Image (cartoon, rainbow, N blue to C red):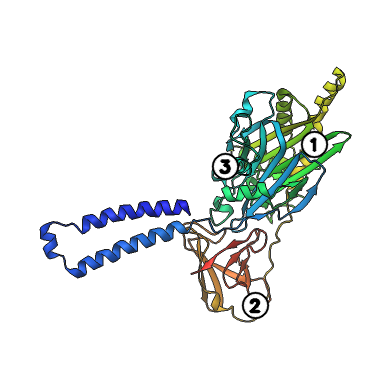
Amino acid sequence: MNGERYFISDAYKEQSQVAKRFFAPSRTMARRMTWWGRLLALVTVSTVLTTSAYALSDDDQSNLQPITNVGGKELKFDWPMLRIGTAEYKEGPTGVTVFSFARPVLAAFDVRGEPATANTEWLRLGKDRATVNAVVLSGGSFYGLESTTAVATAMKDDHVRSGIIGDVAHTTGAIIYDLGDRRLNEIYPDKRLAQAAYRAAQEGVFRVGSAGAGRMAKTGGIFGLNAHSGQGGAYFEKGNLKIAAFTVNNALGTVTDRKGKITAGYFDPAWPKDMDTTTLLGLLRDKWVQGPAQTKPSGNTTISLVVVNQKLNFGDLQRLAIQVHTSMSRGLQPYATEYDGDVLFAVSTGEVDLPTDPKERQANITLLPIIASELMWDAVLSSVPEQPQLPKPVALTTPLPGNYAGTYKFSRFVTVEITARDGKLFAQATGERDAYTIGREKSVELVPVSETLDRFTIASATRYPLVLDFSSGTLVINPGNWAQFSTKQ
């Protein structure tokens, strides 16, 4: 709200100057200006101010309520050093995941592509000093980077850290892109959401699936699979060794299991039923032979974290980050493309010393990244939630209800117009952007997918699930886990 007041105040000042110039005319104009003319000018200025305030409040997030630690399935493990919290705005949906540590830890990171990160330069210095208090993964593209610094200020406000040198909170983090055609609004994880996630953190609990930073993630865009994705996690413990792998999977490539099979996505009806990743990659190669394949620019990023309890120096920790990150190309194919901005953080909590025997020590350092790499593949596989099914139309025996007709606003740039003609319903996007496969150029016919005639899909839909639900009195697109909400105008 403070930002809104600031902008409205600026608009008011600007309009006030216009009003002053208008109400201080030359003598000739003053003689000609009637009382009604002055009144009309005042109404005009007031209207401009009111319109400006409405347009700005349309993007205001101050009334959104953070929802913490919901969604997906729980991965539980015993590790007091590590606390994890998630928070989301269902109106996005979008979210943030905060990993905080009981005491400062040593961290390194590895980058592939064009990432967006916060407070990572310190990690490049190569110092064997444990300084990091939290790793923050967030949606919202660059706007979500606010989450990282918000967790640091929450630590200060809660008296977990102070402003004294050596005790200043150090948080680092990265974001995924979940805006654009992913959803019909531009709500982003802000300071309030990140601090809610931090304060709701639980010991040894991680939410797997469509939760936290992975709330609106997708994979497989390069093949048109467009599978819903999320965040994944896996845990390994043997003796005194603990390893945890976490990822927010938003890759352009597709999730591939250890047998080369595609785990999720909406196949082209012309593809064979046994289509696998190798065959799909072969099709891309064949397209290049016939003529370069065209790939639409998109925003994709997979951001990950591997945590070990063994005490490593910076060099060994950096090597761990590089090796685990490189291994992820097995589970995500292709990986680190031009349109991906992948980042992996590696953390050593320093709770367990390495063996003192040189041979055992070297064997440990060699095997640790191998185990962690396999664990990260498990995390990638777990990131894919159950996919919505393509709805099946129901037989229509009566004309469709005309009371669904109207204008439905999803955001300042996405509006859908529903019209009723000859007992049928049609949808067309009328704002600045399309509403998924509801375009602006022409209307599309809707067909019912429920006996109650309040849920519809597009008549021409053959691949991607798109459900329009009127049961709540307004229009909700894709009701359920990835719902997009509107207000009827």
> What is the total number of numbered labels drawn onto the structure image?
3
* Viewer-proximal residue among 144 and 160: 160
* Viewer-proximal residue among 398 and 434: 434
Q: Position of residue 33 (x, y in %)?
A: 16, 65
- Pointer 1 with pointer 3, Cβ within 8 A: no
Up-down relation of residue 234 to residue 109 (above or below): below
The residue under the point 41% across, 51% down is: 6
- Pointer 2 with pointer 3, Cβ within 8 A: no
Q: Residues within 10 Å of mark 1 (few under 14, many from 20)?
A: many
22 left or right of 363?
A: left
Mark in front: 1 vs 2: 1
Residue 396's disc is 2
Q: Position of residue 85 (x, y in %)?
A: 70, 48
Amino acid type, callout 3: Leu
> In terms of image quadrants, where is residue 349?
top right
The residue under the point 69% across, 52% down is: 211
The residue under the point 35% across, 54% down is: 11
Q: Position of residue 8 (x, y in %)?
A: 39, 55
Q: Secondary structure at mark 2?
A: loop
* Residue 189 in view: no
443 left or right of 10?
A: right
> In terms of image quadrants, where is residue 101?
top right
Amino acid type, callout 2: Leu
Up-down relation of residue 200 to residue 242 (above or below): below
The residue under the point 88% across, 36% down is: 238
**Residue furthest to the bottom:** 398
**Cα distance in 3D space between marks 2 and 3:** 49 Å
Residue holding disc 3: 145
**Cα distance in 3D space between marks 1 and 3:** 27 Å
408 left or right of 214?
A: left
Residue holding disc 1: 243
